[in-house]
Image (cartoon, grey):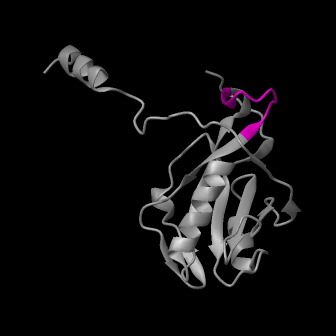
Amino acid sequence: MRLFRSSEILGIAEEALTFAREASEDSHPDEYMGLLRGEDARKLDLDRKGTVITDVLVIPGTQSNPVSATVKTSMIPNDMRAAGSIHSHPNGVLRPSDADLATFGKGKVHIILGAPYGPDDWRAFDQEGKPRDLDVLDVDLPEDDFFDFTQADIDRELRDKEF
C-alpha cells in the first residue's frame, strides 16, 4: 500500500457522476449534497498517475431545502481518499454561490449539478471556484466491500482476545 498518491484529479467515473445526477433528480426541488472520494488511476487499469473520482458519499444527517444543503461536519469521515464535494442547484445555475465558495477550501474538485440533471448539466470547479476541466471516464469500478474485514477476521480476533 502506498502512503502518498498523486494529487492530480484525472476525472470522474461515469458511474459516480450518474449516481449523483440521479440522486439530485430524486432530491429535487431540494438540493442534493455529497462528498467525493477517489482511487488511484492505476488500480482502475489506467496507465496514468493520478486520482479518479470513484465514489459519492452521502453523509448521514445532511439537511437540505430548495436553496441549500448542510452537512453535519461531525459525520464526515476522516478519509485519505477525499477529493472534494458535489451538490445540486435546483435552479439550474451552474456556478458557485458565495456560500459554495466558502466550503470549497477542502478537496481538489467541486461539482455543481443543475436541473434538469442531464448529461451536460454539471460543471467542475477548483478550490477557488474557478471552472476546471474534468473528464468523465468509463472505468470498471472495483467491488469494494463496505467493511474491509470479514467474519473470519472477527472470529479470529475474538478467539485470540483474552477475557
Residue range (magenta)? 43-51
Q: Where 56 sits versus 71, above or below?
A: above
Residue visible at 21% across and 18% down in the picture: 161
Whether residue 138 is visible, yes or no, is yes
Residue visible at 81% across and 53% down in the picture: 134
| Residue 46 forms part of the magenta stretch | yes
Which of the 4 quarters of the picture holds residue 52?
Answer: top right
**Residue furthest top as drawn:** 160
Residue visible at 52% across and 67% down in the picture: 71
Residue 62: x %, y % from top left = 47, 69
Whether residue 104 is visible, yes or no, is no
Q: Nearer the viewer, residue 40 or 98?
A: 40
In the rendered image, the quadrant that contains the N terminus is: top right
Q: Where 99 sits versus 7, above or below?
A: below
Residue 101: x %, y % from top left = 75, 71
Residue 138: x %, y % from top left = 71, 43
Q: Nearer the viewer, residue 104 or 149?
A: 149
Residue 74: x %, y % from top left = 46, 59
Q: What secondary structure characterizes most of the magenta part?
A: loop
In the rendered image, the quadrant that contains the C terminus is: top left
Which of the 4 quarters of the picture holds residue 81?
Answer: top right
**Residue furthest left as drawn:** 163
| Residue 89 forms part of the magenta stretch | no
Q: Is residue 22 left or right of residue 146?
A: right
Q: Where 23 sits versus 17, above or below?
A: below
